[in-house]
Image (cartoon, grey):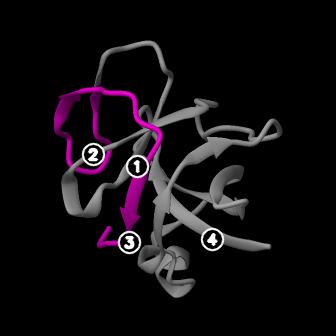
Amino acid sequence: MHAKVVLCRCQKTKQLFGIRIEERNRDWYRTWAFKLDEKKAQREKFDTNQVTGSLMADAAFPGCPYCGNHEFFQCSCDGGKLTCYDGTRSTGTCAWCGGTADLVSTEQFKIKGGSY
């Protein structure tokens, strides 16, 4: 089994968290989410992980550890950072850069680590 952690921020609290993903048959599944501080993320080098492909939710995925959102969107800022999302609006505000954009559904992502 091949697993990685990608970084995400809560849209409501702006707090950093990790999403554990594992590869299954060339697809990536979100399996777990956990609160994370920036120092630990840097020490573990989570900001260097790169992932290309789908990011489907496993049935047991608990969602954002701060607000419970199960969805996310990817901003165009600094390599495509992730922000959790409640799935009900057609626009989103990035918890990393503060930019606002119309949200478009996609099944394929390209995520690379970056600065905090």
The amino acid type of the residue labelled 1 equals Leu
Return the residue nearer the eye: 106 or 115.
106
Q: Nearer the viewer, residue 52 or 90?
A: 52
Q: Amino acid at mark 4?
A: Lys
Q: Residue at x 69, y 63 (%)?
A: 23
Q: Residue at x 80, y 36 (%)?
A: 59
The residue that appears at 47% across and 52% down in the rendered structure is 8
Of the two numbered discs 4 and 2 on the same chain, state the one appearing first in sequence: 4
Is any part of residue 33 visible from this angle?
A: yes
**Is tag 1's residue or tag 2's residue first in the polypeptide sequence?**
2
Q: Is the residue 31 above or below the residue 10 in the image?
A: below
Q: Earlier in the sequence, mark 4 or mark 3?
A: 4
Q: Spatial distance from mark 2 to mark 3, Cα to Cα? A: 13 Å
Where are the magenta residues, as a range?
A: 92-116
In space, the residues marked 1 and 2 are separated at their CA atoms by 6 Å
Q: Secondary structure at mark 3?
A: loop
In the rendered view, tell whether residue 62 sits above or below residue 52. above
Q: Earlier in the sequence, mark 4 or mark 1?
A: 4
Residue at mark 1: 82
Mark found first going from the N terminus, 2 or 3: 2
The amino acid beneath tag 2 is Cys
